[in-house]
Image (spheres, rainbow, N blue to C red):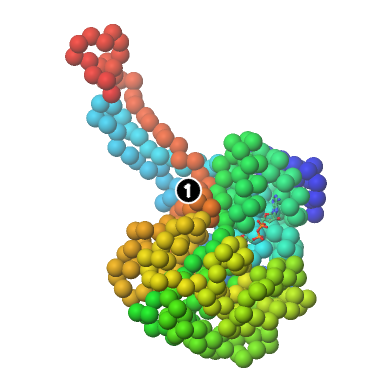
Amino acid sequence: MPTNQKDAATAVERVRGAFSRGLTKPYEWRRDQLVALRSLLLDNQELLERALVRDLGKHPTESQATEIGIVLTELDHTLRHLKRWLRPRRVRVPLVLAPASARTVYEPLGTVLIIGPWNYPVQLILAPLIGALAAGNAVVLKPSELAPATSEVLAALVPTYLDDRAVAVVEGDASTARDLLAQSFDHIFFTGSTAVGKIVAKAASENLTPVTLELGGKSPAYIDNSVDLEAAARRLIWGKLLNAGQTCVAPDYVLTTPRTADALIPHLRAAIAEFYGGDPSLSGDFGRIVSTRHAGRLRDLLDGHDPVIGGRVDATERYVEPTVIDDVDPSSAIMTEEIFGPILPIVHVADAAEAIRFIADRDKPLSLYVFSDHADVRRRFVRDTSSGALAFGLPAAHLSVPDLPFGGVGASGMGAYHGELSFTTFSHAKAVLSKKLAPDTMGVVYPPFTSGKSAI
Ligand code: NAD
């Protein structure tokens, strides 16, 4: 396992060499790598599922839906469309340049670094990898050290299935990430916290390396009493408690009126019991917090609050009970940092207008969820709020739509991917103009600038 700057440099040098030799450019190489990645996933589903159980207590069915399945969908979509995406795209030329032709040609960026987080340690390393390979790049992957079982499995499988001349896995912690960031890359794709995103952007600026930053933050949910609260509660609880709340697009908190909160809370309680039984600690379907440190952080966030549902934390077992807190003070710690756990605060607002102001006064979220049957309320949220994604009636699922951009805005990130956007994110769109020397129609722009000549 590379742990020092020299090892990181060796891995980067190796894959950069493959890119320089042109190994990664042919369509056939890209397709073969994507097909091999598909085999990696299909042949090793149980191995990956077991690693995810060890790291996060993630139920295999959840791993299929939110990790392996999402990557397979992206892979199939990419394999289906890659030939078309690779075609140069003709654009019109202004009359004054005619006859001439112009086209956009997508070329690989070169050697790219993908740094992943621990919460979806398979999906968030392999989904960007699909885009990087499709675009013909050499790739260095740095999985998260906080999901060590998954990191180990990926480090063993990737060189077995993919071309290890051009794809490297470098395992390690923040110091390894720093060693890698000291190298020169043609693109850095980072998924993780906003705080580390800033460190990555700073390091990248040294070499003017472009970055995609897929960051976190607090994703709000607004709900009013025009909707079926029982159905909405199930959707909210599903999105919140996936992966025990450790999901970047989980609804972080709820904005609603005091009356709707009163009506909603029994439905939230019922949804938790329906999904995970009377004691979720006994349910194999409910995950665990990634580390005792993070479980302790969540316990601290509950300090001074009186939950209306749940509230039990067993940090040594990495267990945090599904918890709902009503009427939370917006200035409390739980409302100022990303929760990233199974705790749902409810903040009271008078109406949709106040909810919109509340959101606009804070960092732009990665996702925003609205549950309202009022068309004008939905229109106002589209028009008056800014977020990476806005979803009506269903949290988190937008990221499984390959043709929707997935990414943040402002503090929740920059750049986006999935589907064709993954391909363009890892490509340079090169402008190519061709004009024959004869006939020379450019006489009109050549000096001397006598009367009757026009500028282009
Ligand atoms: P993190 O920022 O702590 O770590 C992410 C990666 O950065 C890891 O590989 C880690 O080794 C590396 N790293 C940590 N400290 C570093 C440093 N000082 N210098 C360089 N690299 C460093 O994030 P995390 O705790 O793994 O993940 C949780 C966060 O990620 C949450 O904020 C969540 O919202 C966000 N997230 C965002 C998305 C998204 O798609 N936008 C998806 C998942 C998670």
Depth order, front residue of 62/241: 241
Q: Residue at x 69, y 58 (%)?
A: 143
Q: Residue at x 60, y 80 (%)?
A: 307
Q: Which residue is mark 1?
A: 424
Depth order, front residue of 10/334: 334
Looking at the image, is 10 positioned above or below residue 82? above
Residue 70 position in % (x across, y down): 54, 67
Residue 205 sits in which quadrant? top right
Q: Residue at x 74, y 79 (%)?
A: 314
Q: Residue at x 56, y 42 (%)?
A: 210
Residue 144 position in % (x across, y down): 70, 59
The quadrant of the rendering that contains the C terminus is top left
| Three-letter residue code for mark 1 | Thr
Element assignment for label 1: helix
Q: Quadrant of ligand 1?
A: bottom right
Is 118 on the left or on the right of 269, as rendered? Answer: right
Residue 361 position in % (x across, y down): 47, 57
